[in-house]
Amino acid sequence: MISLINGIVRAISSDRAVVEVGGVGLSVSLTSQTTAQLNLGTPVQLFTSLVVREDSLTLFGFLDEESRSAFELVQTVSGIGPKVALAILGAHTPQSLAVAIAQEDIKAIEKVPGIGRKGAQRLILELKGKISDFGSVDHKQIHQPVWREQLTSALISLGFTAKDSDSAITAVVSQYADNGIDAQNVDISELLKAALQSGRRA
């Protein structure tokens, strides 16, 4: 899975860019908002999602991890593929999408090309409660310690949702606190083991 690329921008169009990584040019599908922020010949870091089909491999890129996570999450909704998911992220930030879903704002979601009223209703129905993590993402980035971010990433890579990993880590922190131990002083591998056990019990 290609999840992050660092390279030099070699070509830009309205919906994609070619990024040279180690002498190889990768074509990455992007929103028009993202391409507008790129400059030819300059370095760029993109958080990517590789979509594999029988007849194609398509790399989708985003300037931040939250946008990529939201892109992957909206594809869990029945009837939404990567192209519509990219259109959603072109019309909304992860935060504004989270707000629209939480407030059941069908009109805000309907403005996305390729999503009608039924699609908007289905998106709200299937994602309500799942996407709320993005609503407080700025707050989390400021206050979340590095060890907790590493642990969250590890759990998500093992199949946990952001919400489940957060619950598991909180449970582990409480367990250590009950024994008078500060979790940040514990080895990350020990925390991961404890979080996995806690997550399974939940």
Image (tube, rainbow, N blue to C red):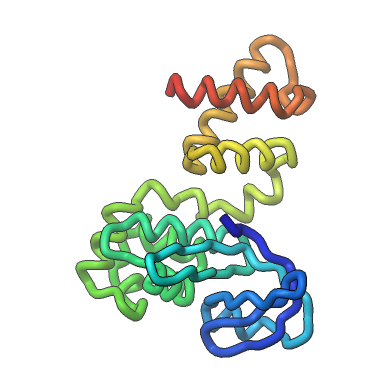
Q: Nearer the viewer, residue 193 or 20?
A: 20
Tell me which corner region of the image, top left, top right, bottom left or bottom right, holds residue 36: bottom right
Whole-percent x, y for residue 6 in the image: 73, 67
Q: Does residue 157 sit above or below 59 in this rendering?
A: above
Quadrant of the rendered structure where residue 119 is? bottom left
Which is nearer the eye, 31 or 58? Answer: 58
Image coordinates for residue 21, horizontal then vertical, percent: 73, 71
199 horizontally vs 36: left or right: left
How many numbered discs, if any?
0
- Quadrant position of the N terminus in the picture: bottom right
Instruction: Tell me the residue at 34%/80% (across/down).
Output: 113
Above or below, comparing residue 143 to residue 39 in the picture = above
Q: Where is residue 130 in the image (x, y as percent from the top left)?
A: 40, 48
Q: Quadrant of the C terminus?
A: top left
Residue at the image point whose x is 61% and y is 16% from the top? 175
Seen from the viewer's position, the closer of residues 169 and 62 is 62
Q: Which residue is drawn at 45% across and 76% down?
A: 91
Vertical side of 14 occupied by 188: above or below: above
Q: Which of 172 and 100 is in front in this view?
A: 172
Q: In the image as oriented, which residue stretches furthest toward the left?
A: 118
* Quarter of the rendering containing residue 7: bottom right
Residue 121 location (% of width, % of height): 24, 63
Residue at (38% x, 47% y) in the render: 129
